[in-house]
Image (tube, grey):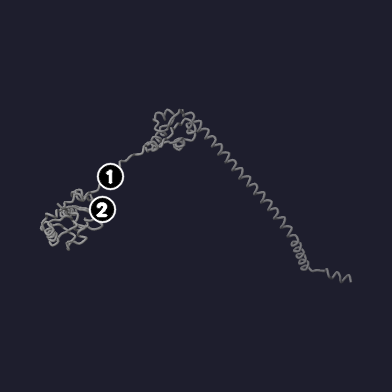
Amino acid sequence: MLEDLKSYFNFNKGERTGIIVVIAMIIAVLAYPYLVRVTFKDNSDEFLKFSKEIEQFQFSLKYSADSADDARRLDFQQMDRSVAENKITPFVFNPNLLPSEQWSRMGLKDWQIKVIKKYEAKGGKFYKKEDFKRMFCISPSEYEILEPYISIPEQKNEYADRKPEVREIKKKVLVDLNTADSVTLLTLYGIGPSFAKRIIKYRTLLGGFYSKNQLLEVYGFDQERFDNIEAKCDVNPGEIKKININTVRTDELKKHPYMDYYTAKAIVDQRVILGKYTSIQQIKSIPLIHEDLFNKIQYYFMLE
């Protein structure tokens, strides 16, 4: 029986190699999780440590740069202030139109004075201290020294004390169509030499205008032209040259633009019948004298 048991543990060389390989693989599988955990832990610790070192390095750089800037700024401001105090000798002044020699006596350089004078030449003016501060030729340190000495009088509103202008209201002058000559008529918009001549000719034939609307009876005179001048002209009926219907002859009366031969003869014949007219209304009884015609010719008749 012992011999049979030994036969189970007798392995040839190839079997022994295989057994060793299997055992090694089992050990490797069992050890793998532990090895991985240890390895990643070490790497993570190293990474965190490295990150902290980088942050510390960046902070040190920033602190160094800020310190350097502060030092430079402090040194520059102190130097600028020191230089300004040495060269500026302030006195109370108004920066508006201050003579160049006064700026120079105060300690400003020629190029600074030229800039200020150029600003004034273009109409520039200082209304408050801060306006002077905005001049690029004046450094902050210089302004800080000069600011207590700047004295700008309070600017008065140039319109506040100005008395209201009293304008003389001129009465609108209208062109009287019954007395205007050709030169005066030419001042009306749209009236040229030709129309001025026609208006005067028609006015003479009528004896004068009793209404502005009679311009529309002038040859070629349209509504648009009339609308353009209506507000600028007027008529004085008192200038009309009237006809005495108790003495006028037929050949004279028929020359009026509102008359023809038959109408003129009818008026004269009616006068002969009546002996004389005692009222202008009497001509309304003549058949040829309709209402519209009477309303026009009544302004040109008179009784004597």
Q: Mark 2 near mark 1, Cβ–Cβ under 8 Å?
A: no
User: Element at badge 1?
Assistant: loop
Q: Position of residue 117 (x, y in %)?
A: 39, 34
Q: Is residue 104 left or right of residue 257?
A: right
Q: Which residue is mark 2?
A: 230
Q: Nearer the viewer, residue 47 or 293?
A: 293
Give the residue drawn at x 80%, y 68%: 11
Query: What mark, if any, has residue 240 been given in the picture?
Result: none
Q: Which residue is mark 1?
A: 171
Q: Is residue 126 left or right of residue 186?
A: right
Packing grade of label 2 (10 A; few <14, some 14-19, many >=20) is: some
Instruction: Please say if 98 is above or below 301.
Output: above
Give the residue drawn at x 26%, y 53%: 230
Q: What whole-number distance in Å separates the C-alpha atoms at marks 2 and 1?
A: 17 Å
Q: Position of residue 39 (x, y in %)?
A: 70, 55
Picture quarter containing residue 262?
A: bottom left
Picture quarter containing residue 251?
A: bottom left
Q: Position of residue 52 (x, y in %)?
A: 65, 47
Amino acid at circle 2 = Glu
Q: Nearer the viewer, residue 60 or 181?
A: 181
Q: Is residue 254 left or right of residue 131?
A: left
Amino acid at circle 1 = Lys
Q: Nearer the viewer, residue 244 or 222?
A: 244
Res. 254 visible in picture? no
**Mark earlier in primary sequence (2, 1):** 1
